[in-house]
Image: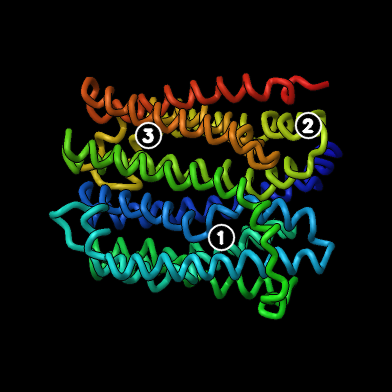
Amino acid sequence: MKYIKTISRTPLFKATSLNSASILLKIGIGIVTSKVLAVFVGPGGMALVGNLRNFLTATETASTLGFQNGIVKYIVEHKNDGKQLQKIISTVFITLLVVTILLSTILFAFSAFWSYFIFGENYQYATIFKVLAIVLPWYATTVFLIAVVNGLGKYGNVIRINIVGNMIGLVFSIIMIWKFNTFGALLSIIIPPSILFFVVFYFINKDIRFFKTISLTSFDFKILKKLSSYSLMTLVSSLCGPLVFLAIRNNVIVTLDISQAGFWEAMTRISTYYLMFISSILSIYFFPKLAFSNSQKATRNVFKSYYSSIFPLFVIGLFFIYFLRFYIIHLLFTPAFLPVTQLFFWQLLGDVFKAASMILGYQFFAKKLTVAFILTEVFSLIMMYCFSHYFIISFGIQGVVMAHALTYFIYLAVLLLYFRKSIVAQ
């Protein structure tokens, strides 16, 4: 009993417990929205939603210049230095405001082109990109403010923000999909994150008077230079990655059909739900720890904490997910999505390798290993595209998830080799 009480008082347990509650809520919301999507838009509409999600991820990264992880690191380092903190916040906010206005102009002016590029000639959704152009500045500011809150060490507030955001997304999605079907589903992806700005602003104002902090005289190009390495890393991962997946999904549509692409999107949504647990606890707890580790031994302790506590629970959870896959499909979707059950084995296997490699990948950001990260990330994206292109021909839609498993197995092996000194440090 004493051991359990001791564990329950640790920061990791507290962060994980609150995070788990947030993730369970988000999964519950995901179940509802997935069911609504399956009923009202079907596999074909699901594929279009997947395409827009990939594009939105890339757009978000471009609008924030990939600064998120860099912001967290420098806020962690200077949160007790008011003057430097003001420089960081002012410099990043002003820069992102200029970038998002430029991107919004491009999105609005060429909305018809983006509709054709993302959805093809059979679907006309230029209005979606005009709406995205309008809400993008709010969206980018929200991402920036969440990174600041995270850097200040307010793990609980970050998770509470996510909970409120999920609830907003649920209500908005149900209404939009019910009223406007596929068009409503697309709107429900781009609008709720911008509404979340007001929630984030409320939380950050408890610690920082945000608008009073912003000052043109505090703008410092040296900070942008320091953040540039993080920008390069995130741009490669979060900009190139979604574009590769967009290309793969379009290849599936051309080679097989749009319903098969919808089945893969359904499998990807399920994967996203359970990976939320790993990715969120890594970003809000383990990444700041890695950023603050100043020796190989300290880094090794962070790795050990992850592999001995979070990762085993994740693997056990995947075993249950695999054996319950038929029930999961009936719960989340409709009988039309039953072919998705054939994709579980390879997807889950790949996600085991992915979860094992994720904390090693965060080490690239924590230690600003820019060149090494870009090389490994580009290598993995090339592998994913090439393997999927080849395997689709031989194995159909299963080829995509087979490519996923093989890619992350090789990726994990490369990272274990690269970080071997930190992993085995005494």
| Colour pattern of the rendering | rainbow
Answer with mark 2 or mark 1, whichever residue precedes in sequence.
1
Question: In what element is the residue under mark 1?
Answer: helix
Answer with mark 3 or mark 2, whichever residue precedes in sequence.
2
Tell me: 10 left or right of 309: right
Looking at the image, do the residues carrying marks 3 and 2 touch, with CB atoms under 8 Å apart?
A: no
Disc 1 target residue: 162
Mark 1 is on which residue type?
Asn
Point out residue 222 in the picture as x, y percentages from the top left corner. 70, 58
Q: CA distance from mark 3 to mark 2?
A: 35 Å
Q: Compared to 155, does 47 lie above or below? A: above
Mark 2 is on which residue type?
Asn
Disc 2 target residue: 301
Q: Callout 3: 10 Å neighbours few (<14), some, many (20+)?
A: some
Question: In what element is the residue under mark 2?
Answer: helix
Front one among 88 and 269: 88
Answer with mark 3 or mark 1, whichever residue precedes in sequence.
1
